[in-house]
Image (spheres, helix red, strand yellow):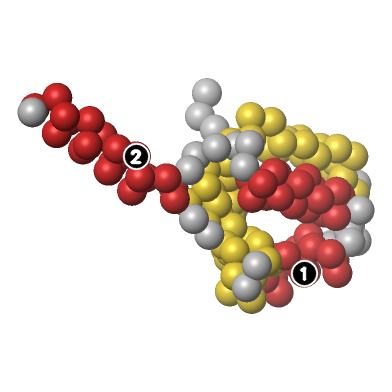
Amino acid sequence: MGKRLFIMGAVVCLTLLAPYSHSQDSPDAANIRALELKLLDCYKHHEVEVFASVLDEDFVITFEDGSTYSKTGYLAYSTSASTHIDSVEIQEMRIRMHRDTAVVTGVYHEKGRDSQKAYDYHDRFTDVWMKESGKWRLIAAHYSVPSK
């Protein structure tokens, strides 16, 4: 009887946890991965329209220095004519799916020039995506400098 009760309990737990699939191979996770890479490309090439289309109206981003930007502020920041991005990439991207929410973490690297001054950023990041009416929107982002 105890073994049978244990198995039934395990089945119930797995059933309850199924909607919180952590699979990075799910169709939604693949969609999120593609959106993350598309955003990198749009950011590098200052393609504001595409960038803006995936940011939620209530989007907020927090940078390494603690400054925060709304959607409008971040778009203005991201399209500065004084910034030239040579390369931008994400490594160690991990996507955790929780129903209609996705949490993406990874390592961010950006290299370029701002007002003719070279920079080379190495950050950890967290992006939070939410699916609404069948469409994924980036609702929050956070960047931090990894400790060594």
Q: Which residue is mark 1?
A: 53
Instruction: Assign the N terminus to one quadrant of the image.
Output: top left
Q: What kind of residue is marked 1?
A: Ser
Q: Which is nearer the eye, 78 or 20? A: 20
Q: Residue at x 69, y 44 (%)?
A: 30
Q: Residue at x 63, y 36 (%)?
A: 25
The mark total stands at: 2
Q: Which residue is mark 2?
A: 14
List x then y, in percent, for residue 61. Answer: 59, 60
Q: What kind of residue is marked 2?
A: Leu
Disc 1 and disc 2 in contact, CB within 8 angstroms: no
Q: Residue at x 81, y 50 (%)?
A: 38
Per the image, label 2 sits on a secondary structure element best described as helix
Whether residue 134 sits left or right of residue 34 in the image: it is: left
Q: In this picture, is 75 found above or below 92?
A: below
Circle 2 residues within 10 Å: few <14, some 14–19, many ≥20: few
Mark found first going from the N terminus, 1 or 2: 2
- Residue 79: name its quadrant: bottom right
List x then y, in percent, for residue 22. Answer: 50, 39
Q: Which is nearer the eye, 45 or 25? A: 25
Whether residue 105 sits left or right of residue 108 in the image: it is: left
The alpha-carbon separation of the residues under discs 1 and 2 comes to: 36 Å
